């Protein structure tokens, strides 16, 4: 197992930028009792998660999980804005987790799947029957919801400062 300074250097230099690798480092650095997290650990973790989200790696990983119906970048952008505007977001160092939780709690998948299915551009400028619109909306909701839940399963406990 790598020592703390090495892991913090890895985070600071952004040598890891996947959810799995960031979570692996996070598990090592963050004790089970999250009340004892030092600022020397929180700052690099926070910055690494911010970079992961803002460099579109979260979107890329979500899209890798949603190949049939690519995850909506607009949906993720709204979740990021909601996290940034939420004063409670300061309780967590993981911008990715906060964004995924916003998607889940604010019904963003439903909102954006419906908007996508009703967008004439999705259908070559003409809207198809209501049945086809409903089918596309449902398929997007299923695939996007599954992807968000799959990403959230990486956290056994919420990454928040108690």
Image (cartoon, helix red, strand yellow):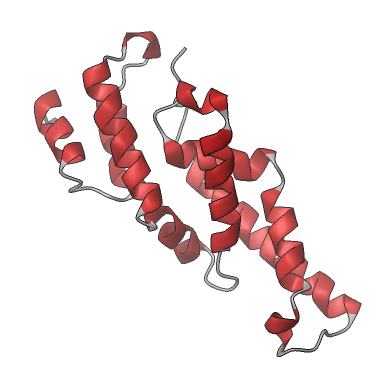
Residue 143 appears in the rendering: yes
Q: Position of residue 149 (x, y in %)?
A: 57, 46
Q: Residue at x 47, y 29 (%)?
A: 156
In the rendered image, residue 43, in percent from the top left (x then y), is placed at 28, 27
* Up/down of 132 relative to 44, above or below: below
Q: Position of residue 137 (x, y in %)?
A: 76, 67
Q: Is 122 or 104 nearer to us in this picture?
A: 122
Residue at image position (54%, 65%) is 66
Within the image, what quadrant is residue 5 found in? top left
Q: How many marks?
A: 0
Q: Is residue 97 above or below residue 31?
A: below
Residue 149 visible from this viewpoint: no
Question: 84 left or right of 139?
Answer: left
Q: Quadrant of residue 117?
A: bottom right
Q: Is residue 55 above or below residue 67?
A: above
Residue appearing at x 26%, y 14% in the figure = 38
Image location of residue 76, percent across then percent down: 55, 53
């Amino acid at each position: 197992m790598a020592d703390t300074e090495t892991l913090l250097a890895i985070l600071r230099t952004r040598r890891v930028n996947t959810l799995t690798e960031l979570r692996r480092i996070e598990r090592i650095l963050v004790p089970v009792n999250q009340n004892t997290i030092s600022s020397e650990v929180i700052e690099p973790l926070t910055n690494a998660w911010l970079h992961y989200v803002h460099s579109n790696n979260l979107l890329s990983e979500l899209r890798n999980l949603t190949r049939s119906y690519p995850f909506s970048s607009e949906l993720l952008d709204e979740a990021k804005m909601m996290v940034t505007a939420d004063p409670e977001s300061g309780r967590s160092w993981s911008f990715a987790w906060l964004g995924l939780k916003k998607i889940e709690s604010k019904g963003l998948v439903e909102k954006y799947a419906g908007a996508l299915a009703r967008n004439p551009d999705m259908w070559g400028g003409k809207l198809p029957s209501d049945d086809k619109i409903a089918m596309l909306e449902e398929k997007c909701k299923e695939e996007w919801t599954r992807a968000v839940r799959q990403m959230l399963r990486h956290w056994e406990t919420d990454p928040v400062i108690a």
